[in-house]
Image (tube, rainbow, N blue to C red):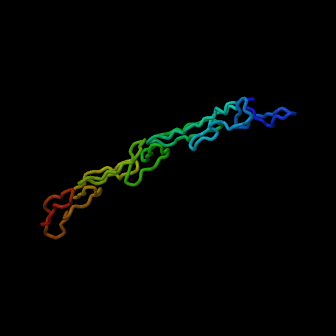
Amino acid sequence: GAGEYENTTCTTSADRMCRAVGAGNYSAAGDNVQRPCFNVECPSGTFRTGECDTSTGAGFRCEVCVDCGAGEYENTTCSAVEGAFVQRTCRPVEPGFYSANGDNTKTECGIGTFAAVAGGSKCSLCSSCGAGLHEATPCTPSADRTCHAVDADHYSADGDNAQRPCFNANCSVEGTFRTGSCDIATGFGYQCE
């Protein structure tokens, strides 16, 4: 019968003896052989759930784990425990981290890059201070660099990020005095006369 397979064959003196199919197998009515249930082996990255119907072989399913989207990483792993499938859950990456689409992990932004908001799929390059500006706060994995105007008698070249004293800001020869004005982008302009 269905769900059973031939244990001993029928002879002229004895009827066929049948036994219940083993776990993960089935036997249709009229078929005296046990066969593996459908979807007994699931592909890598999937999980088997359900119960095999011992008379049809149907019932097992291969459940697919859904990857996290861009800017998200795995919060709860995908699993199957005692036949119950638990889908992966994801959460947004924190500022200072990024996650590419389908990566399921988070990665900290490297030196010279940052991600200021949660849920980033990439890091941005840190800004450089423009001419006449210097770094007020450095670039960190979660915040871009901020810049302020240089102090009096100082300059900063485009992209330098530091302020430096203007050339000839202090006249060291006795009897000379400073004239002109300092170019905040180059440091030139003062003269000692």
Q: Which residue lies furthest to the front in this view?
A: 12
Q: In the image, what residue occupies the spot 72% across and 32% down?
A: 31
Q: Is 109 left, or right, of 90 in this rendering?
A: left
**Residue plotted at (31% across, 52% down):** 136
- Describe residue 2's horizontal placement relative to residue 171 as left or right: right
Quadrant of the rendered image containing residue 54 = top right
Task: Spot the residue most to the left.
Answer: 193
Where's residue 103, x and y in %? Answer: 48, 45
Residue closer to the observer: 155 or 88: 88
Q: Is residue 1 above or below residue 62?
A: above
Of residues 188 and 75, which is closer to you in this image? 75
Residue plotted at (28% across, 54% down): 134
Q: Where is residue 143 in the image (x, y as percent from the top left)?
A: 37, 48
Of residues 32 and 45, the one drawn nearer to the viewer in this rendering? 32
| Relative to 124, residue 31 above or below | above
How far across and how far down the image is residue 105, in percent? 49, 46
Q: In which quarter of the image is residue 9?
A: top right
| Number of marks in picture | 0
Where the N terminus falls, by quadrant? top right
